Image (tube, helix red, strand yellow):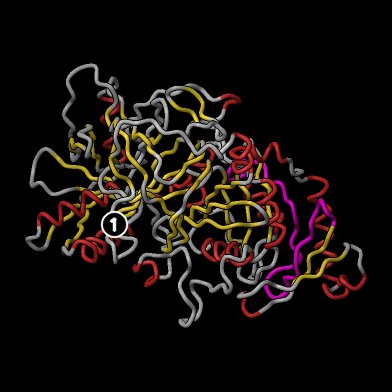
Amino acid sequence: MSPVSEPAPEESQSPLASSSLAQIEREVARRRTFAIISHPDAGKTTLTEKLLLYAGAIELAGAVRGRHARRHATSDWMELEQQRGISITSAALEFELQGRRMSLIDTPGHNDFSEDTYRALIAADGVVMVIDAANGVEDQTRKLFEVCRRHRLPILTFVNKFDRPARDPLELVDDIERTLGIAAAPVNWPIGSAERFRGVYDIQGQTLFRYEREAQGQYRAPVELSSLDDPAARELIGSDLYAHFRDSLDVIREAGTAFDVGEYRAGRQTPVFFGSALTNFGLEPFLQALVEFAPPPQARPSDTGVVNPTDERVTGFVFKIQANMDPRHRDRIAFVRVCSGCFTKDMTLSNSRLGKPLRASRVYRFFGRERETIEVAYAGDIIGLVNPGHFAIGDTLHSGPALRFPDLPRFPAERFGRVRLKDTRYKQFDAGVKQLEEEGLMQVFYTATGRREPIVGVVGALQYDVIAFRLKSEYGVTAEIEPAGYEIARWLGPARGPLPSPTGGSVMAVDRQERNVILFPSEWEMRFFERHHPDVVLLDESPVTTKLPSMPGGSASA
């Protein structure tokens, strides 16, 4: 198969004449690009499937942990994901919903997520946060929320699993505010929980949504609308449940935070919705809010100034590289977030890192593993370019004058293992490690002493299984990963003199770009080094070289 992106002669190329500024503005206004974050088992994958069900993108929804006869989740394309019933990689899903072009960057939902998750958030304009109604805010949610806060991403919250025993909704709202430090504004309020979950009440619209369970949630749930004081609704709900519901609703009306779309988009407030993705209760008002309130594509800073999504110049950046999505082709796909302009098939773009033009001759839109060739894309779209070695994570692609978006940082790894080849296929092993690192699956370090075996840093231990599995299934080599005895990696900032030698069990290493990194066996060892070398700057993210102007209104850089 010929590559999507081929070297092109040095020639300028403008967007199609029919792509007027008005058309660009119109298309950008209807784009919504978002990611979903959650702790494991909060129901993120189920909610993703229901978004597709209600958008008409699929006809039948099946829970990941459902019957064996059901197919695996649409977004889970990797064989290992299908075997284990979990999301391991980020996937791109694009679909239409109520006149909006939705780009959902589905992120891993297992306990040991990867850097892939962090980069997916950087490529999004907004986030949906899923919280388990029984457990409230959990560890992984806190980690991912901090990334969202750092980049000032607006967050819609869906408190899921009210079809099961749940905490009191007042406690859940308080938990969000205390744990995450953000104002929580209930937009609807649940009526009961578990087997007595009857529906939700739209606070602003003053409407009761009463649901009926239908075919284990595989189809849309029938819903009836009524007023709060409807005697028939009160009778169906039950007097005691209705009384408790009214009492808690009165409390939230008097003392709760009122929803304000401006505060939400500024990242200071999260609107809160209650429901059950499994039974489809409460999905309609949540989806309506996603369509109405989620922000369109936003301006992004570059080294030459702010890039607005309606600028005519085409720009974008590579936030993910995925190899072997289609085993028949064994290709590598560069996922590009389009940031401005009207991208057209066969147009010539420049890669700012390489400084040479490339012709985008094959461009794809994705729906899980499925792909289709596209002719045009606008800011907010996620497109895939076949990558025969021309792209790396963080690359800026552009037409017209040169510019560069900020480099994507490498986030701190939390576990480290030494990869040992168990056969003699060194060439395939080296190629596999290199390509998996290019995807951002792991960070690779090499120490100055000892055998030249790579040390991989990952966010979660499950990535070890993914690395070994993919080396075997995609590159034909058998390898095992043993704990390396390190807990922390810190890049070295600009040095004022000779680099000091690490002490104790710490070692000096280099990453793939030959940047100096110290691997520490413990937090104590790192603090000891800092006390004895106060002039040495330790960075928990890899150095980002692009210097950017500040964004208007205080927006954080992506």
Q: Is residue 253 above or below residue 535?
A: below
Residue 203 is inside the magenta segment: yes
Q: Is residue 256 above or below residue 52?
A: above
Label 1, secondary structure: give it: loop
Q: Is residue 392 above or below residue 103?
A: above
Residue 9 is inside the magenta segment: no
Give the labeled residue for mark 1.
Answer: 331
Residue found 45% across the figure and 72% down from its top: 72
User: Picture quarter containing residue 194?
Assistant: bottom right
Query: Toward the viewer: 291 or 247?
Result: 291
Residue found 85% across the figure and 56% down from its top: 206
Query: Toward the viewer: 204 or 412?
Result: 204
Residue found 43% across the figure and 63% down from its top: 370
The magenta-colored residue range is 177-206
Residue 285 horizontal side relative to residue 378, left or right: right
Residue 173 horizontal side relative to residue 510, left or right: right
Q: Position of residue 414 (x, y in %)?
A: 33, 47
Q: Position of residue 420 (x, y in %)?
A: 14, 56
Query: Toward the viewer: 296 or 432?
Result: 296
**Residue furthest front in the image:** 17
User: Picture quarter containing residue 423?
Assistant: bottom left
Residue 533 horizontal side relative to residue 551, left or right: left
How many numbered circles are shown? Answer: 1
Residue 271 horizontal side relative to residue 104, left or right: right
Q: Position of residue 20 (x, y in %)?
A: 58, 36
